[in-house]
Amino acid sequence: MKILAFSDLHGARSRAALIVEASAEADLVIGAGDFCNMRRGLPEAVAMLSGIAPPLVLVPGNSESRDELAAAAPEGAIVLHGQSAEVAGLRLFGLGYAVPETPFGNWSCDLSEIQAEDMLAACDAADILVVHSPPKGIADMTSRGQSVGSEAIYAAIARIQPQLAVCGHIHDRWGERGVIGASEVANLGPTPNWFDIVPHER
Protein backbone atom coordinates (compact mmCIF):
# COMPACT_ATOMS: atom_id res chain seq x y z
CA MET A 1 0.00 0.00 0.00
CA LYS A 2 1.39 3.42 -0.99
CA ILE A 3 1.42 5.88 1.90
CA LEU A 4 1.98 9.61 1.36
CA ALA A 5 2.91 11.45 4.56
CA PHE A 6 3.84 15.02 5.44
CA SER A 7 4.10 17.36 8.42
CA ASP A 8 4.56 21.03 9.30
CA LEU A 9 2.70 22.57 6.40
CA HIS A 10 2.42 25.86 8.35
CA GLY A 11 0.00 27.34 5.83
CA ALA A 12 2.40 27.13 2.85
CA ARG A 13 0.16 27.15 -0.22
CA SER A 14 2.80 26.00 -2.71
CA ARG A 15 3.77 23.04 -0.53
CA ALA A 16 0.13 22.08 -0.04
CA ALA A 17 -0.39 22.11 -3.79
CA LEU A 18 2.49 19.66 -4.28
CA ILE A 19 1.07 17.33 -1.64
CA VAL A 20 -2.41 17.41 -3.18
CA GLU A 21 -0.94 16.71 -6.63
CA ALA A 22 1.13 13.79 -5.32
CA SER A 23 -1.84 12.34 -3.44
CA ALA A 24 -3.38 11.13 -6.71
CA GLU A 25 -0.88 8.24 -6.57
CA ALA A 26 -1.49 7.38 -2.89
CA ASP A 27 -3.69 4.82 -1.18
CA LEU A 28 -3.56 6.74 2.13
CA VAL A 29 -2.43 10.26 3.09
CA ILE A 30 -1.15 11.17 6.57
CA GLY A 31 -0.61 14.66 7.98
CA ALA A 32 1.48 14.72 11.16
CA GLY A 33 0.56 18.12 12.57
CA ASP A 34 1.26 21.86 12.38
CA PHE A 35 -1.01 22.78 9.51
CA CYS A 36 -1.13 26.47 10.53
CA ASN A 37 0.95 28.90 12.59
CA MET A 38 0.43 29.65 16.28
CA ARG A 39 -3.29 28.66 16.25
CA ARG A 40 -4.06 31.12 13.44
CA GLY A 41 -5.36 30.45 9.93
CA LEU A 42 -6.17 26.77 10.45
CA PRO A 43 -9.39 26.61 8.35
CA GLU A 44 -7.59 28.25 5.43
CA ALA A 45 -4.56 25.96 5.78
CA VAL A 46 -6.61 22.78 5.93
CA ALA A 47 -8.78 23.92 3.02
CA MET A 48 -5.64 23.77 0.86
CA LEU A 49 -5.78 19.97 1.30
CA SER A 50 -9.38 19.62 0.14
CA GLY A 51 -8.31 18.12 -3.19
CA ILE A 52 -6.96 14.97 -1.54
CA ALA A 53 -9.15 12.04 -2.62
CA PRO A 54 -7.63 9.02 -0.79
CA PRO A 55 -8.37 8.45 2.91
CA LEU A 56 -6.79 11.22 4.99
CA VAL A 57 -5.55 10.79 8.57
CA LEU A 58 -4.47 13.86 10.56
CA VAL A 59 -3.00 14.49 14.01
CA PRO A 60 -2.78 17.95 15.59
CA GLY A 61 0.60 19.59 16.00
CA ASN A 62 1.41 22.12 18.65
CA SER A 63 0.09 24.87 16.35
CA GLU A 64 -3.52 23.64 16.57
CA SER A 65 -5.63 21.87 19.15
CA ARG A 66 -7.38 18.57 18.59
CA ASP A 67 -10.81 20.25 18.65
CA GLU A 68 -9.70 23.01 16.28
CA LEU A 69 -8.37 20.46 13.80
CA ALA A 70 -11.49 18.29 14.03
CA ALA A 71 -13.65 21.34 13.27
CA ALA A 72 -11.52 22.41 10.29
CA ALA A 73 -10.72 19.00 8.78
CA PRO A 74 -12.08 18.12 5.34
CA GLU A 75 -15.20 15.98 5.27
CA GLY A 76 -14.32 12.33 5.80
CA ALA A 77 -10.86 13.00 7.26
CA ILE A 78 -9.94 11.10 10.42
CA VAL A 79 -8.40 13.12 13.26
CA LEU A 80 -6.48 11.07 15.84
CA HIS A 81 -5.17 12.25 19.20
CA GLY A 82 -4.90 9.38 21.65
CA GLN A 83 -7.09 7.17 19.46
CA SER A 84 -6.72 4.43 16.90
CA ALA A 85 -8.43 3.79 13.59
CA GLU A 86 -8.36 1.13 10.91
CA VAL A 87 -8.04 2.53 7.41
CA ALA A 88 -7.78 0.38 4.29
CA GLY A 89 -6.74 -2.60 6.37
CA LEU A 90 -4.04 -0.72 8.29
CA ARG A 91 -4.13 -0.06 12.02
CA LEU A 92 -3.12 3.50 12.88
CA PHE A 93 -2.69 5.23 16.23
CA GLY A 94 -2.18 8.96 16.51
CA LEU A 95 -0.84 11.31 19.17
CA GLY A 96 -0.53 14.99 18.43
CA TYR A 97 0.89 18.03 20.24
CA ALA A 98 4.46 18.72 21.32
CA VAL A 99 6.01 16.27 23.77
CA PRO A 100 7.59 17.30 26.09
CA GLU A 101 6.39 20.85 26.70
CA THR A 102 7.88 23.64 24.58
CA PRO A 103 9.04 27.10 25.73
CA PHE A 104 6.76 28.73 23.15
CA GLY A 105 4.05 30.04 25.48
CA ASN A 106 0.31 29.69 25.87
CA TRP A 107 -0.48 29.30 22.18
CA SER A 108 1.42 26.01 21.90
CA CYS A 109 -0.50 22.75 22.40
CA ASP A 110 1.83 20.63 24.53
CA LEU A 111 1.82 17.43 26.57
CA SER A 112 4.08 16.41 29.42
CA GLU A 113 5.90 13.10 29.15
CA ILE A 114 3.50 11.66 31.75
CA GLN A 115 0.43 12.82 29.83
CA ALA A 116 1.83 11.37 26.60
CA GLU A 117 2.67 8.09 28.30
CA ASP A 118 -0.88 7.80 29.61
CA MET A 119 -2.40 8.47 26.18
CA LEU A 120 -0.03 6.11 24.38
CA ALA A 121 -0.91 3.33 26.83
CA ALA A 122 -4.21 3.01 24.94
CA CYS A 123 -2.31 1.57 21.97
CA ASP A 124 -1.34 -2.11 22.11
CA ALA A 125 -0.84 -2.66 18.37
CA ALA A 126 -0.45 -0.53 15.26
CA ASP A 127 0.93 -0.76 11.74
CA ILE A 128 1.60 2.98 11.69
CA LEU A 129 2.12 5.31 14.65
CA VAL A 130 1.45 8.95 13.73
CA VAL A 131 2.92 11.45 16.18
CA HIS A 132 3.82 15.11 15.90
CA SER A 133 6.91 14.99 18.10
CA PRO A 134 9.87 12.72 17.37
CA PRO A 135 11.10 10.06 19.77
CA LYS A 136 14.03 10.93 22.00
CA GLY A 137 17.32 10.58 20.16
CA ILE A 138 15.98 10.17 16.61
CA ALA A 139 15.44 13.11 14.23
CA ASP A 140 15.07 15.38 17.27
CA MET A 141 18.23 17.52 17.33
CA THR A 142 17.75 21.29 17.12
CA SER A 143 20.16 23.63 15.36
CA ARG A 144 21.62 24.36 18.81
CA GLY A 145 22.47 20.71 19.37
CA GLN A 146 19.66 19.96 21.81
CA SER A 147 17.91 16.57 21.75
CA VAL A 148 14.28 17.53 22.34
CA GLY A 149 12.38 14.35 21.41
CA SER A 150 10.01 12.43 23.66
CA GLU A 151 11.01 9.56 25.91
CA ALA A 152 7.36 8.46 26.10
CA ILE A 153 7.10 8.25 22.32
CA TYR A 154 10.38 6.33 22.10
CA ALA A 155 9.13 3.84 24.71
CA ALA A 156 5.82 3.43 22.88
CA ILE A 157 7.53 2.69 19.56
CA ALA A 158 9.83 0.18 21.26
CA ARG A 159 6.83 -1.49 22.90
CA ILE A 160 4.35 -1.47 20.00
CA GLN A 161 6.87 -2.00 17.18
CA PRO A 162 4.79 -0.49 14.37
CA GLN A 163 6.09 -0.96 10.86
CA LEU A 164 6.36 2.81 10.59
CA ALA A 165 6.36 5.80 12.97
CA VAL A 166 6.04 9.24 11.36
CA CYS A 167 6.61 12.59 13.03
CA GLY A 168 7.57 16.20 12.38
CA HIS A 169 7.92 19.18 14.74
CA ILE A 170 11.71 19.59 14.60
CA HIS A 171 12.27 21.54 11.40
CA ASP A 172 16.04 21.08 11.48
CA ARG A 173 15.57 17.32 11.03
CA TRP A 174 13.01 17.14 8.22
CA GLY A 175 13.82 14.14 6.05
CA GLU A 176 15.86 12.37 8.73
CA ARG A 177 15.11 8.72 9.45
CA GLY A 178 16.11 6.11 12.00
CA VAL A 179 15.01 2.82 13.51
CA ILE A 180 13.81 1.60 16.89
CA GLY A 181 13.94 -2.18 16.86
CA ALA A 182 12.08 -3.22 13.71
CA SER A 183 10.26 0.13 13.39
CA GLU A 184 11.24 2.76 10.84
CA VAL A 185 11.00 6.33 12.16
CA ALA A 186 10.74 9.32 9.81
CA ASN A 187 10.65 13.06 10.46
CA LEU A 188 8.60 14.14 7.48
CA GLY A 189 8.47 17.85 6.74
CA PRO A 190 6.15 19.61 4.27
CA THR A 191 7.03 17.57 1.20
CA PRO A 192 5.66 14.28 -0.18
CA ASN A 193 7.23 11.36 1.70
CA TRP A 194 6.47 7.90 0.34
CA PHE A 195 6.26 4.57 2.18
CA ASP A 196 5.12 1.09 1.18
CA ILE A 197 3.30 -0.68 4.00
CA VAL A 198 1.77 -4.16 3.84
CA PRO A 199 -1.20 -4.70 6.19
CA HIS A 200 -0.66 -7.51 8.66
CA GLU A 201 -3.08 -10.39 8.51
CA ARG A 202 -5.28 -10.50 11.58
Image: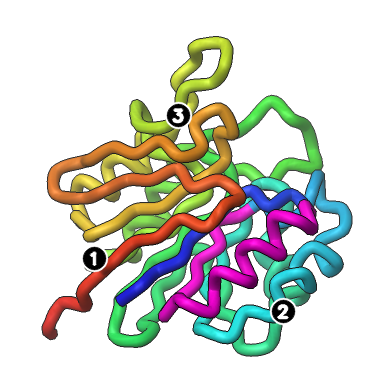
Taking depth in this image into account, of 140 and 85 the one nearest to the observer is 140
Quadrant showing the C terminus = bottom left
Residue appearing at x 62%, y 71% in the figure: 21
Instruction: Answer whether residue 10 is magenta in the image.
Output: no
The residue wearing badge 2 is 50
> Where does residue 92 sit, x and y in percent of width and height?
36, 71
Seen in the picture, residue 135 relative to 57 is either above or below; the reply is above
Residue appearing at x 69%, y 55% in the figure: 15
Quadrant showing the N terminus = bottom left
- Residue 124, labelled with which disc? 1
Residues in magenta, as a range: 11-33
Taking depth in this image into account, of 194 and 93 the one nearest to the observer is 194
Structural crowding at the residue carrying mark 2, measured as other residues with C-alpha within 10 Å and reported as few (<14), some (14–19) or many (≥20)? some
Single out the mark in the foreground, 1 or 2: 2
Left or right: 200, with 6 as reference point = left
Q: Secondary structure at mark 1?
A: loop
Identity of the amino acid at label 2?
Ser
Single out the mark in the foreground, 1 or 3: 3
Left or right: 62, with 199 as reference point = right
> Where does residue 60 sit, x and y in percent of width and height?
62, 58
Identity of the amino acid at label 1?
Asp
Identity of the amino acid at label 3?
Asp
Give the Cα separation between the discs numbered 1 and 2. Answer: 32 Å
Structural crowding at the residue carrying mark 3, measured as other residues with C-alpha within 10 Å and reported as few (<14), some (14–19) or many (≥20)? many
Taking depth in this image into account, of 121 and 178 the one nearest to the observer is 178
Give the Cα separation between the discs numbered 3 and 2. Answer: 30 Å
